[in-house]
Image (cartoon, grey):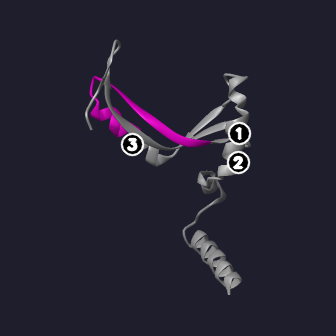
């Protein structure tokens, strides 16, 4: 019975991908924790500062970054980006930004003011 559920889920996934036009390029956003941990433990970017040749930013992360930047006006803003590493990209090692988070701080050239949020 367990095998039937797995094969049905696989068929449903394939049908969903076909109906929604999900291409192989969209698979870049799949996350494999063991693969990421392998690269994080090796840290090849510590030996070569220009290790990453490209950055890919998801539309969601880009919109969040732009909205946060616009909300800051003339004050510098800060945030975090979350993503993964793709060392096997055809163009070279790539950093993939999948999401972005605004930090509740305001910065100037000389100081950063944390806000209570």
Q: Where is residue 103 in the image (x, y as percent from the top left)?
A: 36, 34
Extreme bottom residue here? 1
Q: Residue 39 carries which label?
A: 1
Please name the residue that numbered disc 3 is placed on: 64
Sequence order check: which comes first, mark 2 or mark 3? Answer: 2
Q: Which residue is drawn at 72% across and 42% down?
A: 38
Q: Residue furthest top?
A: 110
List x then y, in percent, for residue 81: 48, 38
User: In the rendering, which numbered label is found on residue 100?
Assistant: none
Mark with earlier residue (1, 3) = 1
Q: Read off the magenta span.
A: 64-84
Q: What element carries label 2?
A: helix
- Please tell me which residue lies in front, 4 or 68: 4
Q: Going 60% across and 43% down the picture, which residue do you hit?
A: 84
Q: Which residue is drawn at 62% across and 77% down?
A: 9
SS category of the residue bearing label 3: helix
Q: In this picture, is 97 found above or below 74?
A: below
Image-quadrant location for residue 41: top right
With 33 as the anchor, is 71 left or right in this view?
left
Q: Mark 1: which secondary structure?
A: helix
Pointers 2 and 1 in contact (CB under 8 A)? yes
Residue denoted by label 2: 35
Task: Locate residue 110: give its quadrant.
Answer: top left
């Amino acid at each position: 019975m367990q095998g039937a559920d797995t094969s049905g889920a696989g068929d449903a996934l394939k049908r969903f991908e076909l109906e929604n036009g999900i291409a192989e390029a969209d698979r870049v956003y799949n996350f494999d924790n063991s693969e990421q941990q392998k690269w994080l433990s090796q840290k090849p970017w510590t030996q070569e500062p220009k290790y990453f040749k490209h950055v890919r930013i998801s539309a969601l992360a880009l919109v969040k970054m732009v909205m946060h930047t616009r909300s800051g006006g003339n004050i510098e803003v800060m945030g975090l980006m979350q993503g993964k590493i793709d060392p096997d990209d055809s163009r070279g090692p790539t950093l993939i930004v999948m999401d972005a988070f605004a930090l509740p701080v305001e910065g100037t050239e000389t100081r950063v003011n944390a806000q209570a949020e």
